[in-house]
Image (tube, rainbow, N blue to C red):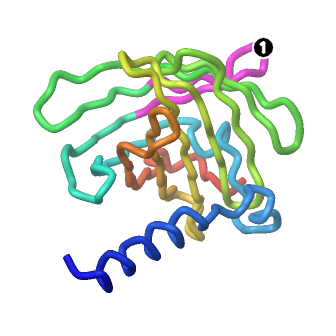
Amino acid sequence: MTFKSIRACALAICLGSCATALPPSAFEGGTPEMRPEIFFAGTTSSSGVIETRSGAPTRRLHVTGAGETLPDGSFRLVQRVSFDHDAPTMRIWVVRRLDANHYTASLTDASGPVEGETYGDLFHLRYPMRSPLGGEMEQWLYLQPDGRTVVNEASVSVFGITVARVSERITHEDNSTSGSR
């Protein structure tokens, strides 16, 4: 490796580490408005891919979901999650809206509370993962202009280092409900 290529790699690493995501509040005013308790009500389905830190695909992901508002005002989403040819597992979310922009939730895949916030067409989630290595999941869910599709871009980090990424397209299947109400 030449000095120029080493210098170029070092510059790329420095520039990459300097990049920061926009704060969720930067999406204020985006339309249609993303409200998870509306978008995920009824039936949803998704497919996606899990990638390594370098972007190499490793597994495919398929999820079907059924969501409903509970008598106490919270929202429950039950998901059937499949990876490639593995047996499906169930994942259960119970979500509660705290104020105009903030949510809290419990999740069977989380080792602690889930924190969420919505601004415009964005729903942003962060939670500690229930796994042998621990780690944290961060999800950026963007409601698309059709009001029936969400693009989920997620990352898994362990000790602050991103170890995997998830790209997923979620579709609202139920004709009686739309994510943009």
Left-right relation of 85 to 59: left
Left-right relation of 91 to 141: left
Height in image: 159 above or below 58? Answer: above
- Residue underneath mark 1: 72
Height in image: 141 above or below 66? Answer: below
Picture residue at 22% right of the left edge, 35% below the top: 83
Q: Nearer the viewer, residue 8 or 93?
A: 8
Left-right relation of 135 to 53: right
Question: Quadrant of the rendered structure where residue 94 is?
Answer: top right
Q: Position of residue 128 (x, y in %)?
A: 55, 25
Q: Where is residue 62 in the image (x, y as percent from the top left)?
A: 28, 40
Q: What residue span does the magenta drawing correspond to?
A: 65-78
- Judged from this view, the residue extending furthest toward the front is 3
**Residue type at mark 1?**
Asp
Magenta stretch contains residue 143:
no
Q: Nearer the viewer, residue 94 or 161?
A: 161
- Judged from this view, the residue extending furthest toward the left is 85
Picture residue at 58% right of the left edge, 36% below the top: 41
Q: Which of 5 and 43 is in front in this view?
A: 5
Q: Is the magenta stretch mostly helix, strand or loop?
A: strand
